Amino acid sequence: MRTGADMADPGERLAVRTVGRGLRRWVIENGRRQPIAVVMGASVNGLSFVRSLGRRGVPTLLLDSDRLIGTYTRYGKLALLPPPDERADAWIELLTSVGSLLGVPGVLFFTSDTHAVLVAEAQDVLRRYFRFLIPSAQTMERIVNKRIQYSVAQATGIPIPKSYFPESVEEVIGIASEVIYPCILKPYKAHLGRSKIVGKVALVQTPEQLVAEYRRLDATEVHFLVQEVVPGGDDTLYGYMAFWDADGCEHSWVTKRKLRQNSRFGDGSLQVTVEAPEVTDQSRRLLRAFGYTGFVGVEFKFDARDRTFRLMEINPRTVSGNQLPITAGVDFPWIGYRYLSSWSRPVPRDFARGVKYLNEEWDLKGFFRLRKAGQLTTWEWLRSLRGVKALAIWAWDDPLPMVVVLWRLLLAGIRRLRWVAEPSRGGATPMGATSSCPGVLI
């Protein structure tokens, strides 16, 4: 197997070995007496895991490929590797090397689709060293592939948006006249398709644009479906977040409503816990149909045309707003750690309704988007923030992630001012751009 060190120049190999020795010492010192937690992914989702576990004294190793916001927390030991969709072998090598040093099995968490697929495909190897809950590789494929996911949903009686699954440009030309515009192009597999488009989906306005955009994406050899845009604002999006144990039984759950997103088809930046029995019922029926185990997030959109909740997607993991259920009394990281480290079933906790969550950075972007469109004033935005209890980034005992966000916003503002003053320069680096690390070995 070719390692990260093999790809690096001599100076980089020395740096990799040095990091490896430090990580080895950390694992030996912390993994002999109690299960360490390994969190794959350092987004705000991963940050919520590291903080929850670290505050309880659980030694936590955080893995990612980029300097995402969670990498600045003081609560976890960080290791950077190549992107998992490019170098899955480097991730498996590191995890098995860490596992071989443990006195007791570690607990493994994954916080993105890419990491979930990696664990599903390598679970036979990883189970020698770690305890984790994940659907089988076959079930994971049925969920990650939107075409199969929607097919199972329809068979279970769960409404979905009007969707088309063309296999060629010719088929797109054939349906272009019957599609209602605007519509979206959505990848079958989000973790493979998002690098081909800007954002989660590609929005198209006309038949001609649909054919042209599909033709471009078809050349990438990533499958895309065509889907209607269900009418309604950000506040018509609802979610079910839960932990299902190894027996396929629901242990703990939360239902929420989005109030605002960072972009039209983006992530929830302002959300609130709500009572949503129809969302809960449909999610349970759907997950039982899949034989689901592990953490999950299911999103629906309320369609006022027929008053149904239409399935948007299933995420076979926790989602970006994971701090919301933690603050609402259902601490999924801690529940999962206690269950997996002892295989005992913690007492289920009910969640508090009306708990409001804010992603500070994303909601600022959402505010600018909506203000530009004339849909939100500054006063209305400030008023909407009243009563927020769950914060994605800021924490008194872990301030550096927020400091980094403020620094990035400052740099982005400076770049913007320079671009306006000297438009011929152009080419400003996007806010928050990061680079990948060549590799980390033990």
Image: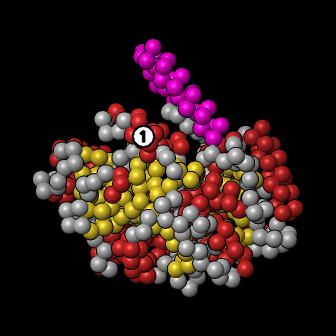
**Which residue is pictured at 46% across the width and 58% down the height?**
272
Q: Does 187 sit above or below residue 153?
A: above
**Which residue is pictured at 57% across the width and 54% down the height?**
390
- Residue 68 percent location from the top left of the image: 60, 45
Q: Looking at the rendering, in which quadrant would you find the C terminus?
A: bottom right
The quadrant holding residue 400 is top right
**Which residue is pictured at 77% across the width and 46% down the height?**
16
Q: Main secondary structure of the magenta part?
A: helix
Q: Residue furthest bottom?
A: 247
* Highlighted range, magenta: 402-429
- Residue 2 percent location from the top left of the image: 67, 55
Q: Residue furthest left?
A: 177
Tally the marks: 1
- Residue 168 percent location from the top left of the image: 24, 57
The three-letter amino acid code for the residue at tag 1 is: Trp
The quadrant holding residue 338 is bottom right
**Is residue 268 at least partly visible in the picture?**
yes
Q: Which residue has dot 1 on it?
A: 381
Q: Is residue 425 magenta?
A: yes
**As drawn, is 372 to the left or to the right of 45?**
left
**As drawn, is 224 to the left or to the right of 138?**
left
**As drawn, is 58 to the left or to the right of 360?**
right
Q: Does 371 sit above or below residue 77?
A: above
Q: Is residue 231 magenta?
A: no
Q: Nearer the viewer, residue 135 or 2?
A: 135
